[in-house]
Each structure stands twice: as structure tokens, then as C-alpha cells.
Amino acid sequence: MKEDIAKLLSPPRKAKLHESIVTQLKGLIHTRKLEVEDKLPSERELASLFGVSRVVVRESIQSLEQAGLIEIRTGPAGGAFVVRELHKPLFHAASDMFHSGELTLQYFYEARRGIESAIVQLAVEKATPEDIERLRMINKVLLSEIKDRAKLRKNNSAFHIAVGDIAGNPLLSLMLKSILDLLDVVLPKSAQSERYIQDTYRRHELIIEAMERKDAARCVELIAVDTEHTTRLKT
């Protein structure tokens, strides 16, 4: 934590200790006075700075973690670190609805197709030669790490998230990330063969080529084919 941050904090009102602490820390994060990868002081230090118990501090940190603004890391260099995973609240809400039976995987597949179709159309309009090259580099990782199937989901998601970044609509990207995170939780990790990974690579290459030609209709068609393959995995 930067040295001058302590000067920006004030003891919270007793009636709403937890809410006040969350609001103050959110404000520091949103205004970049606390930046991504900054480490917060320990619970004991924060409790002293705010003039509250460690229990209140812990509750506040948990709220920020749920909001996707703080990540708790373990180990000798662990602690509470600032992150920017703003899709997490949507992920948690969707996850709760899924586990309560209100949502099925089919709903997520349908939502993903709609969201990615909108994303890829925007990406076609905005993609630069540098963006195209970046997508190719990301896609090549699928093959370079083909023996490590545990990384497939992460590498596959990286491609789709990169297309979202090119599209430049943060709300669409937020929705896509929440859906990809949920599918990563509910679908099996070891269901993909080397053939599946190779096919995924080829589908991505076709999307890149269509994007390079500025062929929006073909990109929408190809992204639908690509997302359809996810539905064939068994939970």
C-alpha cells in the first residue's frame, strides 16, 4: 500500500462500519490511488487505521472480494491484493441461479452465442493489423501447450476475451467473462482430446482470417460454430 493512503482513510461511522470501510476502499481503487496488484495492509493494520475490530475489517475485505476488487492470496507473500475482476458479481449471481436450478447450461449457451455474435461484429469493425497479429499469437498457445490439457480452457477463453477487448464494449466483455468463468466451473476439465484442441485452433484461425477480411457475416457464422462445440462436452 502506498504510504500516503493512510492519510486518506478516516474512522467509519459506528452504525455502518462495514459499509463505510467498503465505500472508502472502493473509492481509492476506482480513483487509482490503490492500483491493480497493490497489496493492502494486514487485517491488524487496517483495523488500527480504521479504529475498528479485525472482524469488521475481514467482513469488508470479503465484500470487496465478492465485488471482484480484492483477491486473497496465500503463502509467504500472500495477503489482500487489488484486482479488477468486475465480472465477479454477475458470475456469482449466475452461479447461484444455476445451482438453485433456475438456469440451465442451455441458457448459458444461448446467452454466450448472442453476446459473442455482438462482440465479433464490433471487433470486425475495429480490428487493426496489430489486433489480428495478437489474436494469432494467442491462438498459437493452444497448440504450443497442447500436452497440458488443464490449460486448454484458460487458453481458449483468452482468445475469446481478446476478441472482446478488440470490440471495445466493456459491458459485453463483462458478461462474456462471467459466462466463461461459470462454464469453467461446471464443465469437466479433462474432456478435451488433442484432436479437440487442434479443431479449436483451426476454428479460431478461420475467425481471424474472416476478421482480417472484414467479413462480419462470416465471423458471426464461425463464432456460432465455435461456441456450439462447447455444448457437446458432457458435465
Image (cartoon, grey):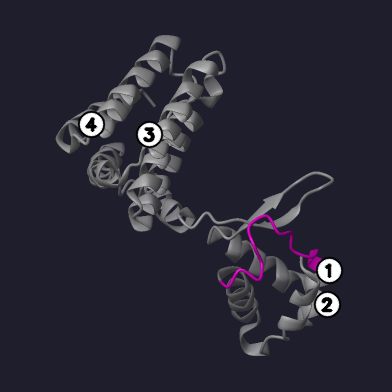
In three-dimensional space, the C-alpha distance between marks 3 and 2, rounded to whole angstroms, equals: 50 Å
Q: Amino acid at mark 3?
A: Ile
Which one is earlier in the sequence, the residue at label 4 or at label 2?
2
Q: Amino acid at mark 4?
A: Arg
Element type at marker 1? helix
Q: For the point 30% across and 49% down, which residue is it? A: 102
Q: For the point 74% across and 63% down, which residue is it? A: 40
- Number of residues whose C-alpha sits closer than 10 Å to that of mark 3, classed few (under 14), some (14–19) or many (20 or more): some
In three-dimensional space, the C-alpha distance between marks 1 and 2, rounded to whole angstroms, equals: 6 Å
Residue position for label 2? 48
| The furthest residue to the front | 129
Between 112 and 221, the residue placed more toward the observer is: 221
In three-dimensional space, the C-alpha distance between marks 4 and 3, rounded to whole angstroms, equals: 11 Å
Residue position for label 1? 44
- Quadrant, the C terminus: top left
In the rendered view, does 68 fall on the left or right side of 136? right
Residue position for label 3? 132
Mark 3 or 1, which is nearer the eye? Answer: 3
Q: Is residue 9 visible?
A: no
4 is higher (above) or lower (below) than 38 = below
Q: For the point 65% across and 71% down, which residue is it? A: 33
Which one is earlier in the sequence, the residue at label 1 or at label 4?
1
